[in-house]
Image (tube, helix red, strand yellow):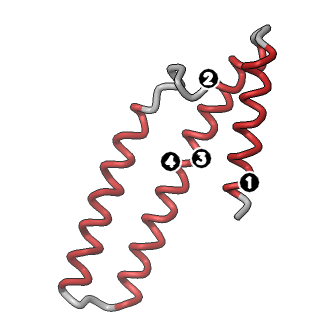
Amino acid sequence: MAKAKKGAAHEDQLHRLSRVEGQIRGISKMIEERRYCVDILTQIKAVKSAVSSIEQKILEQHFHHCVHQAMTSKNKSEVSEMLDEIMTLLKKVSR
């Protein structure tokens, strides 16, 4: 099963996630302090953008490592499983 295999390393995304954690704590504090709505919304947009960037990097790593590995293998079952996984992922993204 493709999911059970060791995938691309995502450690480089941990620093970005830590920054997002800090941004979210900052947003909570802004709300507690009843800060200006536009300032809060600006920070929320920054978090959404950061998470989207992390998602994009992980997806890119998945294609370059996991998908590439499955597609170049001689295991037809693994290739078929990976294609099914990609189709499921694309369906989720398009919702």
| Mark closest to the chain's N terminus, 4 or 1 | 4
Q: Residues within 10 Å of mark 1 (few under 14, many from 20)?
A: few
| Mark closest to the chain's N terminus, 2 or 3 | 2
Residues tagged 4 and 3 counted as in contact (Cβ below 8 A):
yes
Q: Secondary structure at mark 3?
A: helix
Residue type (three-letter) at the residue carrying disc 1: Lys
Residues tagged 1 and 3 counted as in contact (Cβ below 8 A):
no
Figure check: 39 above or below 77: below
Q: Position of residue 75 (x, y in %)?
A: 76, 11
Foreground mark, 2 or 1, reads 2
Q: Quadrant of the N terminus?
A: top right
Q: CA distance from mark 4 to mark 1?
A: 19 Å
Q: CA distance from mark 2 to mark 3?
A: 23 Å
Residue type (three-letter) at the residue carrying disc 2: Met
Q: Which residue is mark 3?
A: 56
Q: Position of residue 41 (x, y in %)?
A: 42, 81
| Mark closest to the chain's N terminus, 2 or 4 | 2
Q: Which residue is mark 2?
A: 1
| Mark closest to the chain's N terminus, 1 or 3 | 3
Residues tagged 2 and 4 counted as in contact (Cβ below 8 A):
no
Figure check: 25 above or below 81: below
Q: Which residue is mark 4?
A: 54
Q: Residue at x 25, y 74 (%)?
A: 28
Q: Is residue 20 left or right of residue 31?
A: right
Q: Which residue is mark 1?
A: 91
Q: Residue at x 35, y 57 (%)?
A: 20
Q: Is residue 4 left or right of residue 81?
A: left
Foreground mark, 4 or 1, reads 1
